[in-house]
Image (cartoon, helix red, strand yellow):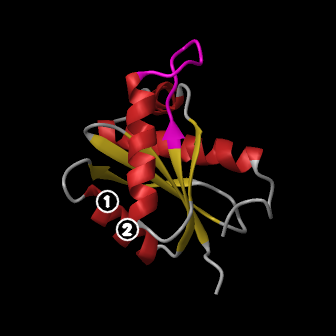
Amino acid sequence: MTAQYLVALDYGHKRVGVAIAQVVARLPRPLTTLQNNETLLADIKKLVDQEDAGLVVVGLPRGMDGGYTQQTKDAEAFARQLAAAITVPVEMADETLTSVDAESSLAGRSHTKGDIDALAATIILERYLAEHPAGETAN
């Protein structure tokens, strides 16, 4: 059976925002926020299994000049660890200003930092889907 969902992660040192989209409908939505602690990889593996995900997209942060930063290196290291821990493909996608966009979108409404992280993951997944027309995503 082909996997039915795509999952995106907005990796952070404290929290990881999670978004999901159905492969056919391709409408990303925030799912949850996970704590970045010793159970993070196991938590993601469980979520991938529960949600029947066929691909995980990890946000790739860059500096305002497009260059690599320490956060870029940390996200890449996390993506490598995740790829070794789960059985579905892991890809990286640009996440430039997704947290800023998410915070702007939530302005004027009651929200938590976790809400921002999950919405940022949704924006990452929206961008990924825009760059990968239907039929071009791993599943």
The answer to whether residue 61 is left or right of residue 139 is: left
Q: Main secondary structure of the magenta part?
A: loop
Tags 2 and 1 touching, CB below 8 Å: yes
Residues at marks 2 and 1, CA–CA distance in whole angstroms: 6 Å
How many other residues sit within 10 Å of disc 1, few (<14), some (14-19) or many (≥20)?
A: some
Q: Residue at x 38, y 53 (%)?
A: 81
Tell me how many marks there are. 2
Residue 27 falls in image quadrant: bottom right
Q: Position of residue 136 (x, y in %)?
A: 78, 59
The answer to whether residue 108 is left or right of residue 14 is: right
**Residue at the top extreme of this rendering:** 65
Query: Which residue position is annotated with label 2?
Result: 45
Query: Which residue position is annotated with label 1?
Result: 41
Q: SS of the residue at dot 2?
A: helix
Amino acid type assigned to the residue bearing label 2 in the image: Lys
Vertically, is 116 above or below 139? above
Amino acid type assigned to the residue bearing label 1 in the image: Leu
Vertically, is 6 above or below 71? below
Magenta part of the protein: which range?
A: 59-69
**Residue at the bottom extreme of this rendering:** 1
